[in-house]
Image (cartoon, rainbow, N blue to C red):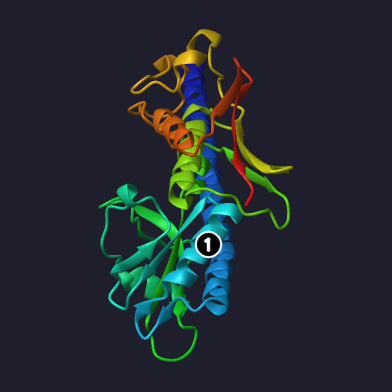
Amino acid sequence: MFRSLYSKLAAVLTGLFCLVGFAIIVVTMFSADMYQQEVNQRLNSKLADHIVAERLLMRENRVNQEAVEDIFHMLMVINPSIEIYLLDTAGTILAFSAAPDRVKRKRIDLGPVKNLLAGHATLPVSGDDPRSLSGKKVFTAARIPEQGQLQGYLYVVQKFQLIAAEKRIALSTKIEEDPPFVNADIGLIERVLENLIENAIQNTPRGGAINLVLTPQNEDVTIQVNDTGCGIPPEELAHIFDRFYQLDKSRKSGQNHSGLGLAITHKILKMHDRSINVASALGSGTTFSFQLPVQ
C-alpha cells in the first residue's frame, strides 16, 4: 500500500512539475515577444517624430504630396519593413506607402493613437492594422505638426517584424550608407520586396534568419533576399515563377498561399527589363536577387 501511495504521489508531483515547467516556458516566450514589441514601438516612435520634424507633410490640412512621396522613397530604401500612413484629425487615411491593393481600411481608430501620444498607455500598444478589417498591430505615431493646430497624424506600422517574431525569425538588413537612387517604379519595386520577404517568412522555419542586402555595383544596385529556410528542390526551380505554382506543402513552414507572389514579382521585374535569379540548397536556404539601374 505504501508503494502504491508513493507511486501515485510521485506521478502527481511529476505531472505538476511538468505543468509548471511548461507554464514557465510559455510565460517566458510571451514575455520575450512583448518585450520585443515594446522595443520596436519605442524605436519607431523616434522615427515617426523625426519624420514629422524634418518634413512638412501637410499644409493647411492638405497633403504635401511632394514631401510624402519623398518619405515613401526614402523608407523603401532605408527600411522597407515598415509602412507609413498619413491620417487626418478623424483618423481617415489620406496617403500611405503600401501597395494600394493591400490596404483594406479607410479609417484608423484614434483611441490607441491618442493614448500612446499622451503617454497614458503601457507598451506595447496595438492599433488598427490597415491591411486587415479586424486585425491589430503594434504601431507608433506622431502628431502633425509637432506644435500648433492639429492637422493630422503619422501612423507607422511594421509589415514583417511581428510575423517573424512569432516564428522566432531574425530579420536584418545590410545597406551601405548613402545608397544611390535607381530608375524604377517605387510602388512596384516595393511590391517585389514585399513578395520576396513574405515568401522567405513563409518558407523559413522557427529560429531561422532572413537578410535583405543592397549592394551598389557600377551602374546597378543588386538587391538580395536570402533566408535559412528549407530550400527548393532542383526539379522545382524552373517552375517557381509560374502562376499558381506551389511547392510541396510538406516543405512549407507557414500558411498556404495562392502561389501568385513570385509570379507577380517576375512580371514586375520583366516590366523593368530586368530578370530575377534564384539560388537554393535543400536544408540550407534560398537567395533571390535582381538588379536595378542607377540613376
Compared with 83, 222 (above or below) is above
Q: Can residue 240 be seen in this snapshot?
A: yes
Q: Which residue sits at x=27%, y=65%?
A: 107
- In-front residue for pair 80/142: 80
Number of numbered labels in the structure image:
1
Q: Which residue reaches farthest top?
A: 235
What element does badge 1 sit on?
helix
- In-front residue for pair 98/164: 98
Image quadrant assignment for residue 280:
top right
Q: Which residue sits at x=60%, y=30%?
A: 227
- In-front residue for pair 46/175: 175
- In-front residue for pair 132/275: 275
Q: Where is residue 207 in the image (x, y as percent from the top left)?
A: 59, 32
Q: In this view, does 135 lie to the left or right of 18?
A: left
Q: Where is residue 79 in the image (x, y as percent from the top left)?
A: 57, 54
Q: Where is residue 131 in the image (x, y as percent from the top left)?
A: 33, 51
Q: Which residue sits at x=54%, y=71%?
A: 51
Which residue, given by chain and number where applicable, does mark 1 sit on?
A: 41
Compared with 234, 73 (above or below) is below
Which amino acid, by three-letter code, is at mark 1? Gln
Q: In this view, does 292 lie to the left or right of 198?
A: right
Compared with 10, 226 (above or below) is below
Q: Which residue sits at x=73%, y=56%?
A: 177
Q: Position of residue 78 (x, y in %)?
A: 61, 55
Q: Is residue 18 left or right of residue 248?
A: right
Give the class, few, some or many, for how many residues have Cα within 10 Å of label 1's Cα (few <14, many ≥20): many
Q: Can residue 166 be seen in this snapshot?
A: no
